[in-house]
Image (cartoon, helix red, strand yellow):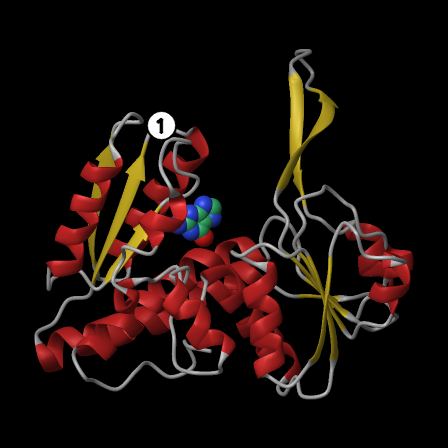
Amino acid sequence: MTATVIDGKAFAAKVRGQVADHVARLKEEHGITPGLAVVLVGEDPASQVYVRSKGKMTVEVGMNSFEHKMDADTSEEALLKVIQDLNNDPSVHGILVQLPLPDHLDSDLVINSIDPAKDVDGFHISNVGLLGTGQKSMVPCTPLGCLMMLRDHHGSLSGMNAVVIGRSNIVGKPMAQLLLNDSCTVTIAHSRTKDLPGVVKQADIVVAAVGRPEMVPGDWIKPGATVIDVGINRIDAGLKEDGSPKTRLVGDAHYDSCAAVAGAITPVPGGVGPMTIACLLANTVTACSRANGLKEPEGLTA
Ligand code: GUN
């Protein structure tokens, strides 16, 4: 079998289009422009790239983008004050504090100081609890993007065996919860799991979110299964013609061998990656609609 390639780039563009339509309606019918505030502490190069890209796409869908850049040695008190001001600002509907934070800052404390209704990352303990009990919440962007792609490909996920490899708070745990809420039978596997190949072989849906390049080979995959690859790993790829080092991006799944047996697979790049920012924008328009007591956008929530 050769797998269907799930085109996350095209899917994300479609989601952004739906967000833009909803933003236009909020503006025309209610005079409201959704606003997303991103807080970046320090100068981590990867974080700077993400934040720039988020700001650009926020504006492209017609929303207001607010950026708060703070020095790496910012005090916790100063950061909490910025968050408090954003919590109280009615033009801000979504707040994202870019992670990782510098070591001297307590990420849990900072995240839990965000108003849960504006927590577009879905990391606040209130949102984690709401998701865990099947109530309306803000849902973490990457797992939400994976869920949207799975629902689009399969329709109903009810009764499917899903194995999530990885137990992070950002991806693994919320992903498992979302799949459970969609009536999958869910296993969370991790570095201590016994017979990981055997566990993965049972899965109709495999979500690989471990951060280890090409860790999942094709012979772990049940023929016809769907592989959702959350990994984005940069690895060495020999030398360029001028002798300088070359790199390439790979996922947590070994693409060629998995694609040879899977029914469907997300590529890296161009799979899950583009869905994350699209879902951040979707969460912001959802938060704005809820804050104003208006109907939520359809198809953009869990
Ligand atoms: N850093 C890497 N991914 C994320 C994310 O999804 N949200 C935030 N806030 N920071 C991140």
Q: Looking at the picture, tell me which residue is in the foreground, 214 or 21.
A: 214
Q: Secondary structure at mark 1?
A: loop
Asked which quadrant contains residue 238, the reply is top right
Asked which quadrant contains residue 127, the reply is bottom left
Q: Residue 107: give x, y in percent of width and height.
A: 39, 45
Q: Residue 80: give x, y in percent of width and height.
A: 22, 45
Disc 1 crowd rating (10 Å Cα; few below 14, some 14-19, many 20+) is few
The answer as to whether callout 1 falls within 8 Å of ligand 1 is no
**Residue at point 63% right, 87% down?**
156
| Residue assigned mark 1 | 43
Asked whether, in this view, residue 263 is left or right of residue 79, the answer is right
**Residue at point 87% right, 67% down?**
201
The extreme top residue here reads: 243
**Residue at point 29% right, 25% down?**
73
The correct choice, above or below, for 283 with respect to 69 in the image is below
Q: Amino acid at mark 1?
A: Glu
Asked whether, in this view, residue 184 is left or right of residue 17, the answer is right
Q: Quadrant of the N terminus?
A: bottom right
Q: Residue 299: give x, y in percent of width and height.
A: 43, 81
Q: Residue 134: give x, y in percent of width and height.
A: 48, 83
Asked which quadrant contains residue 281, the reply is bottom left
Asked whether, in this view, residue 68 is left or right of residue 179, the answer is left
Q: How many marks?
A: 1
The extreme left residue here reads: 31
Q: Looking at the picture, tell me which residue is in the foreground, 19 or 242.
A: 19
